[in-house]
Amino acid sequence: MKRIGWIMIVVWLAVMALPTHAATTVVRAILFYSPTCPHCHEVMENVLPPLKAQYKEQLEIASINVLEPDGQSLYQAAVAQFQIPQERLGVPALIVGDQVLVGSQEIPDRFPTLIAEGLATGGIDWPKLPGFKPPSAAVLASSFAPRLSVGERLALDPVGNTLAIVVLVGMIAVAGWVTYQGPKRAAPETTLPAWRQWATPVLALAGLGVAAYLSFIELTATDAVCGPVGNCNAVQQSPYARLFGVLPVGLLGAIGYLAILGAWAVGRWAMGRTAAWGRVAQAAFVAFGVLFSIYLTFLEPFVIGASCLWCLTSAILMTALLWLSWQPGLEAWFSLRRPPSRRDRRRRAQARATR
């Protein structure tokens, strides 16, 4: 009985060792990239996802953004460690073992062969790069996943993505309506009701609060309070959360809302042409904000596959500001282009005389 027991233990250990051995046969590589590099996007979107789909957990690739300070330091360390010559500097650069592949042509040509050879010889560990820390398993699992169709992205968050599409359609409709109505009504400047005059700073302050919160989330890399609908953390952690991979979109929004508030203050309390230019600037800032919000809102359901209630709230606020600001801004623009009337010249002369 003891002999049978020992045989069973040996067989069990042998069986358990088989999958463990297979799982340890992995090829690991480091990709240096830049978000503003089209060749990097070609490699990251069209070359690596099929390889990941083919080899699954047997292929691990850590991506490092060279526009970030830590990423640039690691890239310089790689240049020194692997003695990359001057004519081969640049991204995308893929390091596999002691091999350095550069460019959107060399990587697809040589990387598949290196993967096959590495798996046949027991795997390739992470390149020996000073300062490099392998990413977590969760980050590696989500990197360079096969590209999803539009339908598959929408299905990731059907409720949130449907809401984002509704907001997107509403923004486009309002933008088209004010654009169509504006030139027809661009006559002498009209006096707006008091509630419309003060609605602008209220909405802009609300938008500034949203943008400030998103800036805090993006700069500190903390989890946001997302609410019952959508997945704002997926949006904030996507590559589209930073403009050109550097400037957080939330921070750009905060700057935009501050510019709108400043232009509104000039239009509200300045006099003459200065006030008119303030209203024109306000309309221009808001129009840019709406166009950029339309772009970001489009990305959420159709590219990222997740929606952010904070972002949608900012988009709605910016659209409301367009409805409030466009007509006064257009009227101010036409008034600036018209030659001053005799009455306007007399008012300006009286204003200068009283100063």
Image (cartoon, rainbow, N blue to C red):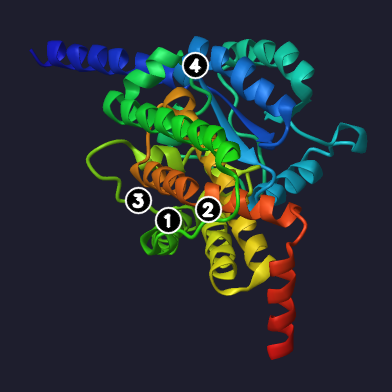
In the displayed structure image, the side of residue 280 where residue 341 appears, left or right: right
The tally of labels here is: 4
- Do we see residue 140 in this rendering? no
Residue type, label 4: Pro
Q: Quadrant of the N terminus?
A: top left
> Which secondary structure, mark 3?
loop
> Which secondary structure, mark 1?
helix
- Image: 91 above or below 73: above
Decide which of tag 3 and tag 4 comes sooner along the chain. Answer: 4
- Image: 271 above or below 42: below
**Contact check, label 1 and label 4, Cβ < 8 Å:** no
Q: Which residue is mark 4?
A: 146
The image's mark for residue 224 is 3
Decide which of tag 1 and tag 4 comes sooner along the chain. Answer: 4
Decide which of tag 3 and tag 2 comes sooner along the chain. Answer: 3
Label 2 Cα crowd, 10 Å radius (few <14 / some 14-19 / many 20+): many
The image's mark for residue 254 is none
The image's mark for residue 207 is 1
Decide which of tag 1 and tag 3 comes sooner along the chain. Answer: 1
- Residue 80 percent across, percent down from the top left: 80, 45
C-alpha distance separating marks 1 and 3: 17 Å
C-alpha distance separating marks 3 and 4: 27 Å
